[in-house]
Amino acid sequence: MKKMVNHKILILHGWNALPEDHWFSAAKEKWEKKGFRVEVPNLPGNYFPKIDEWLKVIESFQPDKSWILIGHSLGGVAILKYLEIAEKPIAQAILIATPLTAMHFGSIDNFFEGGFKWENIKANCPKFEILNEDNDPAIPIEHGQKYANNLSGNLHVVPGYTHFHTINLKFLEKLIESKN
C-alpha cells in the first residue's frame, strides 16, 4: 500500500463484534507498520446498539478529508448515518457486507430510522467502494447493488460465505490505493 500523505483509517466493526474480531486487528497492525494511523474503536451496545452512541464515537475522531472510513456490516450503516450529518467531507468510505435494512434484527431498527439521505451522504464523501460476498449468509448482494446505485459507488462481489469474517487485505489495500 502506498502511503497517502496524512491519511488515517477508521475501521468500524458490526453488530455484536469487537475490535479484536475477524480481520480488524490484522489490518490495523499491517497498516500501522506502513505508517498509517489506524483506529478500531469498541462500539457500544453489543446486541442492542444505539446509532446515536456510535455516531458520538465516530465524531470523536473528527473525520475530515484525511480519513478513510471502513465499515463492516452495521459499521457501514453507521458510516452512512455519520455522513448524513458530517460537517466536513471525508476522503473515502468502504462498506463491507453492509445491510440496507434491519432485516430480522429488531435490535438495530434505530440505525435505519428515516431511511438514508443519499445527497447528504454523497456530498460528504467523493468515493464509495462496496464489497459483498456472493454467498453471504446475512447480507444479500441486492443490498450492495442498491448502495452502489444510490451512492454512485463501485460494487465488488467476491466469492465467499462468511459475511467477511475474513478478507483479503491485499484486495482491500488496492481499494484504498485507488483513492489517489
Image (cartoon, grey):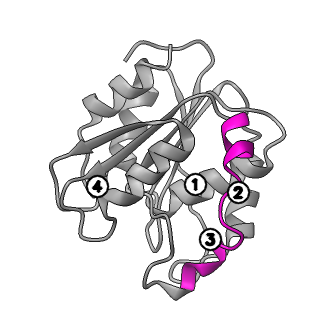
Q: Are marks 3 and 4 in contact (CB under 8 Å)?
A: no
Magenta-span inclusion, residue 146: no
* Disc nearer the start of the sequence (2/4): 2
* Residue under numbered circle 4: 164
Look at label 4 and name its amino acid. Answer: Phe
* Disc nearer the start of the sequence (4/1): 1
Choose between 29 and 82: the one closer to the eye.
82
Q: Position of residue 109 (x, y in %)?
A: 60, 80
Q: Is residue 67 above or below residue 6?
A: below
Q: Which mark is residue 41?
A: 1
Q: Are marks 1 and 2 in contact (CB under 8 Å)?
A: yes
* Residue under numbered circle 3: 112
Q: CA distance from mark 3 to mark 4?
A: 21 Å
* Residue under numbered circle 2: 57
Q: Residues within 10 Å of mark 4 (few under 14, many from 20)?
A: some
* Disc nearer the start of the sequence (1/3): 1
In front of the other: label 1 or label 3?
Answer: 3
